[in-house]
Each structure stands twice: as C-alpha cells, then as structure tokens.
Amino acid sequence: MRKLLYALAVTMLLFTSWAQAQPELRPGHPERYTVVKGDTLWDISARFLNNPWYWPEIWHVNPQVANPHLIYPGDRLALVYIDGQPRITKVASSDVVKLSPQVRSEPIDTPIPAIPLDAIASFLTDTRIVTPEEIEGAPYVLEGEDSRIITGAGDRIYARGEKPADKVGIFRRTQEFRDPDTGEFLGLEARSIGTGRVTAENGDVLTLELTASNQEIRIGDRLLASVDRPIATSFVPSAPEQEVEGKMIAVDGGVSQIGQFNVVALNRGARDGLEPGNVMAVLRSGNLVRDPVTGETIELPSERAGLLMVFKTYEKMSYGLILQATRPLAVGDKVTNP
C-alpha cells in the first residue's frame, strides 16, 4: 500500500510539473508594454508569462514592422489574440499616437539582450575550460621588469615557452571540475586576468607588454593565444530538446548560497544535449528525515526553487545564469527540464 501511495504521489508531481510547463499568461499581465533601456527579453517575458521561456512560442511577427524579430528601447508591445490564442507583437509606429517628437534612446543596431549580459560577459570572452595538458604546456610568467613579482597593465613582463601568438591572454588556473556522482573529469577552468602583446623573443624567453589587466599578474601565470569572441546577444529561451538531469557543481565567486544572476557550473554539456539558451529548472534537494516506524533515513522529494539559462556549453559541462530563485540555492542542487 505504501508503494502504491508513493507511486501515486510521484505521478501527481510529474503531472503538476507538466501542467506548469504549458504556456500560460501571468495574472495581471499588461495589455501593452513600452520597452525601456535596461530591459531584457527575460524581464519582458516574465511580465506576460508565468513561464518566460515560452516567449518564442507566443511571439507573433508583424511583417509591417522593420526588424520584427528584434526589440529595441521605445518599441511598443501589445497582447493580441489570433485564432483564439494569445500572441505578443510589436505595434507598428502608425498605430501609436505621437504627442511630441521623440528620439530613440538606443542606437538602431542595439536590440535588447535576452538576459543581462553584464553578469556573464567575462565568461563569454575570457573564462575558458581547458585540459590540464593545455594549461601545463602553455608558456608561464617568469617575472616582471626590474624583478617585480607582481605586475599589471602597462608593465613589461618576461615569460618562458613557445610563443602561442602575437596577442596573448594571461590566464590563471582556478577550478578543476569533476562529476560529483561518477568522479569523471569534466574540465579545468582557466580565468583570464589580463592581455598582452609579445614584443620580442630570445630563444624560449618572451618579452611582453601588458595591455590590460583585471587582477595582479604573478609569477607562474600562463599565456594562451588571445581569441576575439564577440559577445553573443541572441540567446533564445527554450527547453532542452531531450530530457536532461544534472547538478550545479560550482558557483562563481565562491559564495555559499546561490541567488539571482549568479553564474553556476553544471555537470552536463553538449554531449548531453544542452545548448546555449536552454532553460533549466533548479530543484532544491529535499531534507533527510528519519522514518519513525522503520528507523530508515528518507530523503524528501526535491522542490522546484528556481530557473537558470545555459549560456555557454562545452563537451562535458556548461555554465548557466540563475534567472529566478524563490529560495536560496546551493551547489549540489539538481537541474532538469523546466
């Protein structure tokens, strides 16, 4: 009987999760909304929908509006019904009564991003997941000019190793990621702390001019080829195409509790079907309780406590940004399809 009740409870939980995953309008949603500077696609979606990742499914392209797929500050959005289904569309300028001349506050080539890019910019352009062989085989800093052991932007430094490129990034080994369940090595995080330009070679000794730094550069830091990566702004919220279950294995900054706009590392990546833009539900691990009848230790069911969007994937792992958190989250919490 107990097994039957447990199975019924699990079935009801799955049904509830499925029902919550359907596109539904948020109570008290606006009929119209004017986009302002600082908005993101996620913010606007959350004004209209209980589940913002369904924005692409209710977005209606108006062919009468220039750049209908892009949204800019000053644009007017309207909730309309087409064939009985709610749709959100941009209102053409001819539909808006202008009381006074107005100037668009953003350049025409700057649509609003899907998520706050300032929270993830360093991960899109600087932070890398590498193998131990890559970082250990890279040239390393010997010292700075005049025997300095700590240097920064504008200084000259010396390094030893084969020149990777004329323009290089200076990286520091930070975290090694392993799957918490299997122990599999997932990747090594190398954090960019500066950039430089190789100005001279004397055998395997390199002379560099530091062009930028965000931390003090120290003896032993590594040099990797600099790669110009434009920051992506075209994340489209979507559920993964297949079932994915994993865990948050680290949080940027080393904080103990995870909240909105924290960057987290996941033990699932491209090989598991994750893509940038995928939205994942975060499940807070249930408490451990003692069964008063049998004396067994029982883990209570996990509870949904937040949402994150994957913004960068590697083969075995990925990075995500916490977009919603209804309670403090922690490393080890589960992630799954929304």
Image (cartoon, helix red, strand yellow):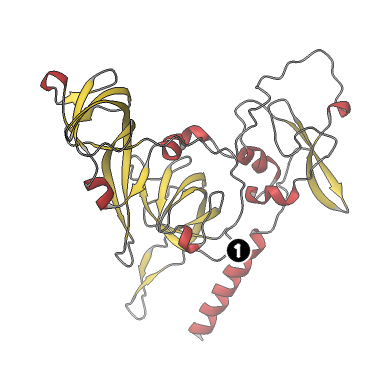
Q: Is residue 97 left or right of residue 168?
A: right
> Compared with residue 7, is residue 145 higher up or lower down, i.e. above or below?
above
Q: Residues within 10 Å of mark 1 (few under 14, many from 20)?
A: some
Front one among 24 and 226: 226
- Identify which residue, 209 or 176, lies in the foreground: 209
Looking at the image, which residue is at 61% across and 53% down?
A: 238
Of residues 307 and 200, the one nearer the viewer is: 200
- Residue at the front extreme? 203
Look at 51% across and 86% down and name the residue there. Answer: 1
Q: Position of residue 41 (x, y in %)?
A: 63, 39
Which amino acid lies under the numbered mark 1 shown in the image of this protein?
Ser
Residue at 46% x, 38% y is 120
**Relative to residue 28, is residue 16 drawn left or right?**
left
Where on the picture, by quarter, is residue 173? top left
Residue that carries the numbered disc 1 in the rendered image: 17
Considering every residue shown, the one lying at the far left of the view is 147
Q: Secondary structure at mark 1?
A: helix
| Rendering quarter of residue 5 | bottom right
x and y percentages locating residue 338 in the rendered image: 57, 58
- In this rendering, the answer to whether 8 lies above or below 243 is below
Residue 299 position within the rendered picture, expressed as x and y whole percent measured from the top left: 39, 69
Position of 231 with respect to 167 (left or right) is right
x, y percentage for residue 138?
Answer: 24, 42
Q: Is residue 195 above or below residue 242?
A: above
Examine the rendering and report whether any part of residue 150 can be seen: yes
Q: Tell me if residue 16 comes above or below residue 210 in the rendering.
A: below
